Image (cartoon, rainbow, N blue to C red):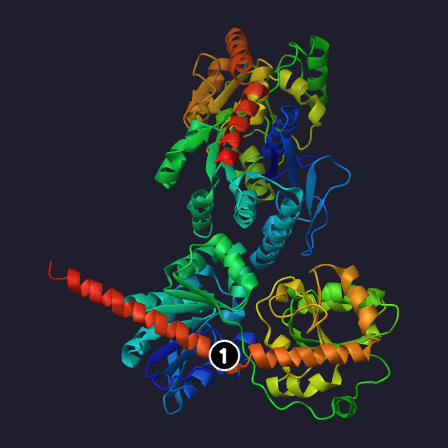
């Protein structure tokens, strides 16, 4: 079977969708699917003359370059220019996909990938599996809501990564939601522990923290959906001892930066918070393992790869209740109500002084991930769906 | 030509542009309206008041163009200031335009509404037609479909317009394919190509070429290729410059008969021409009236339309009608047949365009033959009366469909 995976981002671009796309492509290839992956290149200097070609330097990759998504420049480019780029990408990608003999199109993210994939699949008269990774604000955006409906209605099949997305989809489009596949993300198991005490202390020293602080990590870019203000308020409410530090491991979006800096000063957190924009992918497991608590207070998220990786590293995870699919409250993690800083603060306060509980929750989290979240299960689910769609 | 002696219908045409505005939609609307008027259709043409500013109070300027042909300009509107006007203001202006057009329609009492350009005219026309209970035919011309389909802010209105219309026409197969891929099309969906007024062929093209070049001070020692219209990125002029720079056998000049809409595009074009060493081989006339464009055509050896995306440019048909050979991208494959009535290359394929220019600009015999075949195609397929007759047939289909629906409703009503 020959499939075209159309993710919104693909490595070397970073982020959850890119990570998931690389994982899915790799495991489906191992399983014998002839996978072609589209890389919307947001790294090259932008100009509207987009080109779509088979990338001679990477196996099974179609490069769409330059593209405007997945960086700040998307906000600076006029919508009419984006429209022209989307059109060129869609038309050229259709030609490339036709020449490759693609049998099925699988998109990841509704914008822009799902939209372009809808067009390509329609032109080729091939099935389109729409992978919904998160809706963001789009359903509530006057200019995007109709697009969402159109992409959902035109998809041959829809797959979501967690139950909270399915619930939102049921409200947005009940007809589509009635027949949706739920295929969670996965994470590959590694030996544990992967970090000794010296390694742990070295990472903390690199951050300027002493070995005995309780290190809380938020491993994601800070956009509005991750409610940075709520997290800072929760941190400020924690007792002085034991000493806590917050590592934000990602980028503060320029639109959030001013408010973020003001909150740090106002809440007296300037010396308790460190932001690291980039951490090499290969040391992610160690950095997670050096953390005591991994926190994920998002109001809208698909299924965070970092959260699964933290669970695989036996970390204690505190997350908003949108992640109830994989976290069971007080069993293998802590769930708190979305948008509730006092609940988040209370949960963190209960954990910072209780290392035994953190350890127990982390061990249970690792056990769950090893039992239920392996890549083979994810790949098998996609292959089953592909076969059904191509056969029909 | 089809005889429409029995034509006695009233049509409200809602067009995005109308002369004296320049541009393809204005030219096409004027041609379509003139043809329909000749055939006896009673017409009210509604367009925007392009001279108004968004701050103006809502108004309608109405003039009787001739017996049975009214022109109404509705304002204010944001068409030429789209990027300066907020979405809230646009919505308010759309609503005001809808109320004005509805009032005009109620007074005129048309049998059907024909919108030319899907957004925003087509959208507003669809609402008016629905309120009056009459059929709505909408006509896709180019950007209104091919860009709006990929535009976050326009998609919803576009989808509504296409899927709620009773009929839709496209000027090319390219646009029809795009629409079929994306939308559920109405029962009546047809391709109605643009038309062109066929005039007498020039008696001595070579002499006319010399006279025209002298008149416009165009040097005659090198081939001159032309591009006609608004120069926008989608027209592929970057490709044309790259090809021009690569041509070996001749040193062609490029005359852009028209101008750039966006100053940034113009600057980028000039910079590219400079970088490629073409600055002294490229000239831009600036915006010209339609009749002056036609006067300039005989000075050209060929026209090049390297579009990445397009509808059916009037310039293409007008060049063909004048017997001018056209190098066109495959967007125009339903008009041009390679090697017979035109020279075609795949869009974006600069190497192929270069090869064609290299090969044929030094072959006046071939260019002449291609130009003659192009004129013959224009005569046989694109006479404006064919276009008019095609619209009349669509109108009649829509109106006969309405009669059928009306009867069915009558049968059911007593229950």
Q: Where is residue A18 in the image (x, y as percent from the top left)?
A: 62, 34
Which is nearer the eye, A34 or B71? A34
Which is nearer the eye, A171 or A223? A171
Q: Where is residue A111 in the image (x, y as percent from the top left)?
A: 54, 44
Which residue corresponds to the image point at 39% horizontal and 84% vertical from the top-left? B4
Q: Position of residue A353 (x, y in %)?
A: 52, 11
Which residue corresponds to the image point at 54% horizontal and 80% vertical from the top-left? B27
Q: Residue furthest right?
A: B249
Q: Using the image, name the chain to which the residue with label 1 belongs.
A: B
Which residue corresponds to the image point at 69% horizontal and 81% vertical from the top-left? B372
- The quadrant where residue A335 appears: top left
The quarter of the image holding the N terminus of chain A is top right
In-image side of B405 versus B29 (left or right): left
Say if A60 sits above or below A293 in the image. below
Q: Residues within 10 Å of mark 1 (few under 14, many from 20)?
A: many
- The quadrant where residue B110 appears: bottom left
Say if A352 sits above or below B351 in the image. above
Q: Can residue B324 be seen in this view?
A: no
Say if A57 sits above or below A310 in the image. below
**Which residue in the protein does label 1 denote?**
B386
In-image side of A190 versus A232 (left or right): right
Q: Residue furthest left?
A: B414
């Amino acid at each position: 079977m020959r499939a075209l995976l159309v993710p919104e981002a693909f490595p070397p671009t970073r982020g959850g969708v890119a990570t998931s796309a690389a994982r899915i492509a790799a495991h489906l290839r191992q399983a014998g699917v002839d996978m072609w992956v589209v890389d919307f290149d947001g790294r090259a200097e932008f100009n509207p003359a987009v080109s779509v070609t088979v990338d001679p330097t990477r196996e099974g990759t179609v490069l769409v370059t330059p593209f405007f998504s997945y960086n700040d420049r998307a906000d600076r480019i006029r919508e009419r220019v984006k429209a022209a780029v989307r059109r060129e990408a869609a038309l050229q990608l259709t030609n490339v996909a036709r020449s490759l003999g693609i049998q099925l199109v699988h998109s990841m993210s509704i914008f822009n990938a799902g939209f372009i994939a809808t067009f390509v699949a329609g032109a080729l008269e091939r099935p389109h599996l729409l992978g919904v990774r998160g809706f963001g604000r789009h359903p509530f955006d006057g200019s995007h809501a109709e697009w969402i409906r159109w992409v959902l209605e035109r998809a041959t099949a829809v797959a979501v990564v967690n139950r909270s997305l399915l619930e939102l989809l049921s409200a947005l489009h009940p007809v589509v939601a009635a027949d949706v596949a739920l295929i969670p993300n996965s994470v590959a198991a590694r030996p544990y522990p992967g970090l000794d005490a010296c390694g742990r202390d070295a990472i903390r020293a690199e951050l300027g923290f002493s070995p005995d602080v309780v290190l809380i990590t938020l491993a994601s870019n800070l956009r509005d959906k991750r409610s940075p203000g709520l997290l800072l308020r929760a941190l400020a409410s924690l007792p002085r001892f034991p000493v806590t530090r917050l590592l934000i491991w990602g980028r503060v979006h320029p639109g959030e930066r001013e408010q973020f800096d003001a909150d740090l000063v106002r809440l007296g957190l300037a010396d308790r918070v460190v932001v690291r924009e980039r951490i090499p992918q290969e040391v992610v497991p160690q950095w997670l393992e050096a953390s005591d608590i991994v926190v994920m207070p998002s109001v809208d998220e698909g299924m965070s790869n970092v959260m699964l990786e933290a669970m695989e590293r036996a970390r204690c995870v505190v997350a908003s209740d949108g992640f109830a699919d994989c976290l069971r409250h007080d069993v293998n993690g802590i769930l708190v109500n979305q948008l509730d800083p006092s609940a988040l603060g209370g949960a963190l306060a209960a954990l910072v002084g209780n290392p035994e509980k953190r350890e127990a929750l982390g061990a249970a989290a690792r056990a769950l991930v090893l039992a239920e979240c392996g890549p083979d299960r994810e790949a098998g689910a996609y292959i089953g769906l592909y076969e059904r769609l191509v056969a029909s | 030509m089809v005889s429409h002696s029995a034509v006695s219908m009233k049509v409200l045409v809602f067009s995005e542009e109308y002369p004296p505005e320049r541009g393809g939609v204005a030219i096409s609307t004027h041609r379509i309206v003139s043809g329909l008027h000749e055939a006896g259709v009673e017409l009210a043409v509604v367009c925007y008041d392009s001279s108004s500013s968004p701050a103006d109070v809502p108004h309608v300027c109405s003039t009787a163009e001739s017996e049975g042909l009214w022109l109404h300009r509705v304002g204010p509107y944001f068409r030429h200031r789209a990027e300066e006007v907020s979405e809230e203001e646009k919505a308010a202006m759309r609503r005001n335009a809808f109320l004005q057009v509805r009032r005009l329609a109620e007074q005129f009492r048309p049998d059907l509404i024909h919108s030319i350009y899907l957004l925003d005219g087509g959208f507003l026309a669809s609402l008016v037609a629905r309120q009056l209970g009459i059929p709505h035919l909408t006509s896709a011309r180019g950007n209104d479909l091919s860009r709006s389909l990929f535009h976050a802010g326009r998609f919803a209105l576009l989808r509504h317009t296409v899927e709620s219309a009773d009929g839709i026409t496209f000027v090319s197969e390219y646009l029809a394919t795009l629409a079929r891929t994306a939308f559920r099309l109405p029962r009546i969906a047809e391709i109605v190509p643009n038309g062109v007024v066929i005039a007498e062929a020039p008696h001595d093209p070579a002499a006319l070429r010399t006279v025209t070049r002298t008149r416009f001070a165009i040097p005659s020692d090198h081939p001159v290729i032309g591009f006609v219209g608004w120069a926008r990125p989608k027209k592929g002029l970057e490709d044309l410059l790259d090809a021009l720079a690569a041509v070996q056998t001749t040193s062609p000049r490029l005359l852009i008969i028209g101008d750039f809409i966006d100053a940034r595009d113009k600057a980028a074009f000039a910079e590219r021409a400079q970088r490629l060493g073409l600055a002294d081989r490229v000239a831009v006339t600036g915006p010209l009236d339609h009749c002056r464009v036609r006067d300039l055509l005989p000075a050209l050896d060929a026209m090049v339309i390297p579009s990445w995306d397009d509808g059916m440019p009037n310039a293409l048909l007008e060049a063909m009608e004048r017997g001018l050979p056209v190098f066109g991208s495959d967007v125009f494959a339903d008009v041009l047949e390679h090697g017979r009535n035109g020279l075609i290359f795949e869009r974006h394929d600069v190497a192929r365009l270069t090869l064609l220019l290299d090969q044929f600009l030094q072959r006046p015999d071939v260019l002449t033959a291609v130009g003659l075949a192009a004129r013959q195609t224009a005569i046989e397929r694109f006479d404006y009366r064919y276009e008019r007759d095609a619209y009349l047939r669509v109108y009649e289909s829509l109106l006969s469909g309405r009669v059928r629906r009306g009867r069915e409703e009558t049968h059911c009503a007593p229950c």
